[in-house]
Amino acid sequence: EALNELIMLGAVRLVPVDTMGMSDASAQVYNEELTPLGDHLAALPVEPILGRMIIMSMVLGGFETGLTIAAVLSVPDIFISSARGDSKRRLQQFCATSDVLAMVAAYNTWSTILRDRGVESARNFAYDNSLSIPSLTMIDGVRKQLRGVLKARGFFSRPVGPDKLIMDLNEHGGRLGLQLALVCSAIPNLGHRTTGSSNIITRSVPDAAIHPSSVNQIPPGSRAAWYLYQELVLTRRPFLRNTTVASALEIVLHGGSFVGDDTLGGCILDHWILTKGDPDNVQLLISARQAINEAMEELTRDPSRVPTSTEKRLIAVTFELIEQARGTQMPVAVAQSVES
């Protein structure tokens, strides 16, 4: 299953082996080979899907946001567990429908206070909001480590000045569409609540619920139709942890393990969800997703590559569609600069 996931990510490809001269020449044999993307992912100290999301963030114009999402999902929970349930509504002030983006916003606010007002003010902010200072500090370390690996592999070698590089890599960093696209890219697990049901269906269980610690356990995210979730835990019942409310549009464009299916006229997500609709609209979304993925693959082959104007326009349009579907363009706070 791990190999299949790497193939789905585009990190590994199967190469046919010449079977001439073998005892059973009728059987097709394959060797596994790292793709250029897989070569980069092997160097990054995070899970492959998070490494892929970081590289995708460079294409989408949200590098700093991608770094922070990857770091947040790689360290212990930044909200102190003993207090998180009691401070859920306080957590919602950072983001009301995504645990991941709430953690991103909390980290960014803490980091800004630390930079501008000093250690004491940052410590007070963490205490007031039930944040773990060790986890926040670990995020800093993971971000710096990831940036160092990417720099060593040539990803900051575009033929532009440093100010233009920062602007290009973070062109859409404050947009809700960008943030949701990256969360979809980072968390492939999908859950669906049918109309009128209190249960959430996942690939493995039909009766999951939102974990009590999640922002989505209470309104406005408590009755959504679609969720991304990082982990399914089995206690007194199946619970989904680290959830994000998602729309069908976001999921088709950026979410889940994706397989196009021309026979069925749609695509299969997370190995179990068949997406169908108006054939022309579905094909447009699938084509947009494939074009963005191709731009990322080109970047893995040439880390100094600059996205084309057509790619930039396509990406901006997908963000506009996501934001229109959400009815808002309100961003989560994000870091504004790339450290040297």
Image (tube, rainbow, N blue to C red):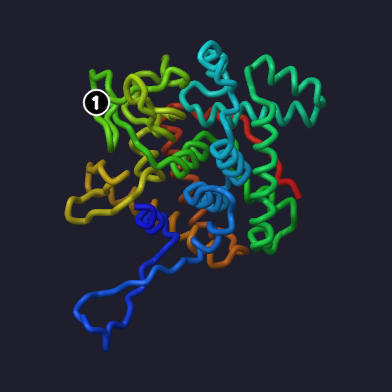
Q: Is residue 111 above or below residue 313?
A: above
The residue drawn where x is 70% and y is 60% is: 160
Q: Nearer the viewer, residue 176 or 257?
A: 257
Looking at the picture, how far across and down is residue 26, in whole percent? 19, 79
- What residue occupies the far bottom of the structure in this picture? 21
Residue reaching furthest to the front:
23
For this rendering, which residue is in front, 18 or 126?
18
Q: Is residue 139 visible?
A: yes
Give the side of residue 213 with respect to residue 174, left or right. Answer: left
Q: Which residue is mark 1?
A: 194
Q: Residue at x 71, y 19 (%)?
A: 125
Q: How many marks?
A: 1
Residue 60 visible in the picture: no
The image shows residue 51, relative to residue 301, as above or below, that is above
Please state the horizontal and vertical placement of residue 204, each as a whole percent of the image.
Answer: 28, 36
With 51 as the anchor, is 265 left or right in this view? left
123 with respect to 317 (left or right) = right
Against 46, residue 332 (above or below) is above
Residue 321: where, in percent of width, then height? 42, 38
| Type of amino acid at the residue the image marks with label 1 | Thr
Give the percent coordinates (x, y) of residue 177. Answer: 49, 37
The residue depicted at 69 percent of the width and 42 percent of the height is 141
Numbered disc 1: secondary structure: loop
